[in-house]
Image (cartoon, helix red, strand yellow):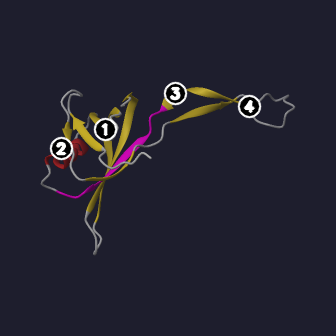
Amino acid sequence: MAQGYKTKFYRSDDGTSYSQVAGMLDLEPGEESRGSVDMTPIDGTSGYMDYDPSGLRDPGEASITLIWKESDSGQQSLRSDYDSDSNKYYKVEYPEGTTVEFLGHITGWGKAVPKDDKITRTVKFKISGKPSVTAGS
Protein backbone atom coordinates (compact mmCIF):
# COMPACT_ATOMS: atom_id res chain seq x y z
CA MET A 1 0.00 0.00 0.00
CA ALA A 2 1.45 3.33 -1.09
CA GLN A 3 1.37 6.13 1.46
CA GLY A 4 2.07 9.84 1.08
CA TYR A 5 4.30 9.98 4.17
CA LYS A 6 7.77 11.30 3.21
CA THR A 7 6.48 13.09 0.08
CA LYS A 8 8.45 16.29 -0.49
CA PHE A 9 7.68 19.56 -2.27
CA TYR A 10 10.31 21.80 -3.89
CA ARG A 11 10.44 25.12 -5.75
CA SER A 12 12.97 26.64 -8.15
CA ASP A 13 13.57 29.82 -10.10
CA ASP A 14 15.39 28.08 -12.96
CA GLY A 15 14.14 24.47 -13.03
CA THR A 16 17.59 23.17 -12.13
CA SER A 17 18.37 24.07 -8.52
CA TYR A 18 15.46 23.22 -6.21
CA SER A 19 14.88 24.04 -2.52
CA GLN A 20 12.53 22.07 -0.30
CA VAL A 21 9.52 23.80 1.24
CA ALA A 22 9.18 22.62 4.85
CA GLY A 23 6.11 21.54 6.77
CA MET A 24 3.90 20.03 4.08
CA LEU A 25 0.84 18.35 5.59
CA ASP A 26 -1.16 17.55 2.46
CA LEU A 27 -0.78 17.63 -1.29
CA GLU A 28 -3.54 17.68 -3.87
CA PRO A 29 -1.76 17.19 -7.19
CA GLY A 30 -4.83 18.22 -9.14
CA GLU A 31 -6.64 16.71 -12.04
CA GLU A 32 -5.78 17.07 -15.70
CA SER A 33 -8.70 17.47 -18.06
CA ARG A 34 -9.52 17.88 -21.70
CA GLY A 35 -12.52 19.06 -23.61
CA SER A 36 -14.85 17.27 -25.95
CA VAL A 37 -16.46 18.30 -29.22
CA ASP A 38 -20.05 17.27 -29.88
CA MET A 39 -20.02 15.21 -33.10
CA THR A 40 -23.61 13.95 -32.93
CA PRO A 41 -25.10 13.86 -36.43
CA ILE A 42 -28.53 15.42 -36.78
CA ASP A 43 -29.68 12.30 -38.55
CA GLY A 44 -28.32 9.95 -35.86
CA THR A 45 -30.36 6.92 -34.85
CA SER A 46 -28.71 5.65 -31.64
CA GLY A 47 -30.28 8.14 -29.26
CA TYR A 48 -26.81 8.87 -27.81
CA MET A 49 -24.53 11.84 -28.32
CA ASP A 50 -21.18 11.27 -30.05
CA TYR A 51 -18.00 13.07 -28.93
CA ASP A 52 -14.44 13.48 -30.12
CA PRO A 53 -11.67 14.73 -27.84
CA SER A 54 -10.66 18.35 -28.39
CA GLY A 55 -7.02 19.12 -29.06
CA LEU A 56 -6.03 21.01 -25.91
CA ARG A 57 -5.54 19.60 -22.44
CA ASP A 58 -5.68 21.58 -19.19
CA PRO A 59 -2.92 20.51 -16.77
CA GLY A 60 -5.13 21.62 -13.85
CA GLU A 61 -4.32 23.04 -10.46
CA ALA A 62 -2.37 21.69 -7.51
CA SER A 63 -2.47 22.72 -3.88
CA ILE A 64 -0.41 22.10 -0.78
CA THR A 65 -1.24 22.63 2.86
CA LEU A 66 1.68 23.59 5.07
CA ILE A 67 2.22 23.97 8.78
CA TRP A 68 2.47 27.76 8.89
CA LYS A 69 6.02 28.88 9.65
CA GLU A 70 6.67 32.44 8.50
CA SER A 71 10.43 32.07 9.14
CA ASP A 72 10.87 29.10 6.75
CA SER A 73 12.84 30.20 3.70
CA GLY A 74 10.81 27.88 1.44
CA GLN A 75 7.54 29.43 2.58
CA GLN A 76 9.05 32.90 2.16
CA SER A 77 10.02 31.97 -1.41
CA LEU A 78 6.46 30.83 -2.10
CA ARG A 79 5.22 34.23 -0.90
CA SER A 80 7.65 35.89 -3.32
CA ASP A 81 6.33 33.59 -6.06
CA TYR A 82 2.78 34.69 -5.25
CA ASP A 83 3.81 38.35 -5.50
CA SER A 84 5.64 37.67 -8.78
CA ASP A 85 4.06 38.03 -12.21
CA SER A 86 5.86 35.03 -13.70
CA ASN A 87 5.74 31.26 -13.63
CA LYS A 88 8.14 29.32 -11.42
CA TYR A 89 9.25 25.70 -11.29
CA TYR A 90 7.88 23.22 -8.73
CA LYS A 91 8.58 19.57 -8.04
CA VAL A 92 6.89 16.83 -6.03
CA GLU A 93 8.98 13.85 -4.95
CA TYR A 94 7.04 10.78 -3.86
CA PRO A 95 8.44 8.27 -1.34
CA GLU A 96 9.24 5.56 -3.92
CA GLY A 97 11.20 8.06 -6.04
CA THR A 98 8.73 9.22 -8.68
CA THR A 99 9.03 12.95 -9.36
CA VAL A 100 6.59 15.32 -11.03
CA GLU A 101 7.93 18.68 -12.17
CA PHE A 102 5.75 21.52 -13.39
CA LEU A 103 5.85 25.17 -14.33
CA GLY A 104 3.17 27.34 -12.81
CA HIS A 105 2.14 30.31 -10.73
CA ILE A 106 0.42 30.69 -7.37
CA THR A 107 -3.26 31.59 -7.58
CA GLY A 108 -4.24 31.18 -3.93
CA TRP A 109 -2.56 32.15 -0.66
CA GLY A 110 -4.72 31.14 2.30
CA LYS A 111 -4.36 30.57 6.01
CA ALA A 112 -6.45 28.76 8.63
CA VAL A 113 -6.20 29.70 12.30
CA PRO A 114 -8.24 27.24 14.38
CA LYS A 115 -8.48 27.91 18.11
CA ASP A 116 -7.44 24.39 19.13
CA ASP A 117 -5.12 23.18 16.36
CA LYS A 118 -2.09 24.22 14.32
CA ILE A 119 -2.13 27.23 12.00
CA THR A 120 -1.88 26.13 8.37
CA ARG A 121 -1.20 27.77 5.03
CA THR A 122 -2.87 26.55 1.81
CA VAL A 123 -1.14 27.43 -1.44
CA LYS A 124 -2.80 26.87 -4.83
CA PHE A 125 -0.92 26.59 -8.12
CA LYS A 126 -2.12 26.88 -11.73
CA ILE A 127 0.00 24.51 -13.78
CA SER A 128 1.23 25.81 -17.14
CA GLY A 129 2.14 23.28 -19.83
CA LYS A 130 2.64 19.54 -19.58
CA PRO A 131 4.06 18.27 -16.27
CA SER A 132 7.17 16.09 -16.50
CA VAL A 133 6.90 12.73 -14.74
CA THR A 134 9.94 10.60 -13.95
CA ALA A 135 9.04 7.16 -12.63
CA GLY A 136 10.72 5.91 -9.46
CA SER A 137 11.62 2.36 -8.57
Mark 1 / mark 2, whichever is N-terminal: 2
Residue 40 on image: x %, y %: 76, 30
Residue 58 on image: x %, y %: 47, 34
Mark 3 / mark 1, whichever is N-terminal: 3
Q: Which residue is mark 4?
A: 50
Most extreme residue toward the top, as rendered? 55
In the displayed structure, 88 sits above or below 67; it is above
The residue stretch that appears in magenta: 58-69
Q: Which mark is drawn over residue 93?
A: 1
Mark 3 / mark 2, whichever is N-terminal: 3
Tag 4: amino acid: Asp
Labels 2 & 4 near each other (Cβ < 8 A) = no
Q: Secondary structure at mark 1?
A: strand
For this rendering, which residue is in front, 126 or 5? 5
User: What is the chief secondary structure element of the magenta stretch?
Assistant: strand
* Magenta highlight on residue 67: yes
Tag 1: amino acid: Glu
Kindly identify the residue that appears in the image at 85 percent across and 28 percent down. Answer: 43
Q: Secondary structure at mark 2?
A: helix
Which of the two marks, 3 or 1, is nearer to us in this view? 1
Tag 2: amino acid: Ser
What is the spatial separation of the Cα atoms under label 2 and label 4, in whole angstroms?
47 Å
Q: Which residue is mark 3?
A: 56
Which of the two marks, 4 or 1, is nearer to us in this view? 1
Q: Which residue is mark 2?
A: 77
What is the spatial separation of the Cα atoms under label 1 and label 2, in whole angstroms?
18 Å
Kindly identify the residue that appears in the image at 87 percent across and 31 percent down. Answer: 45
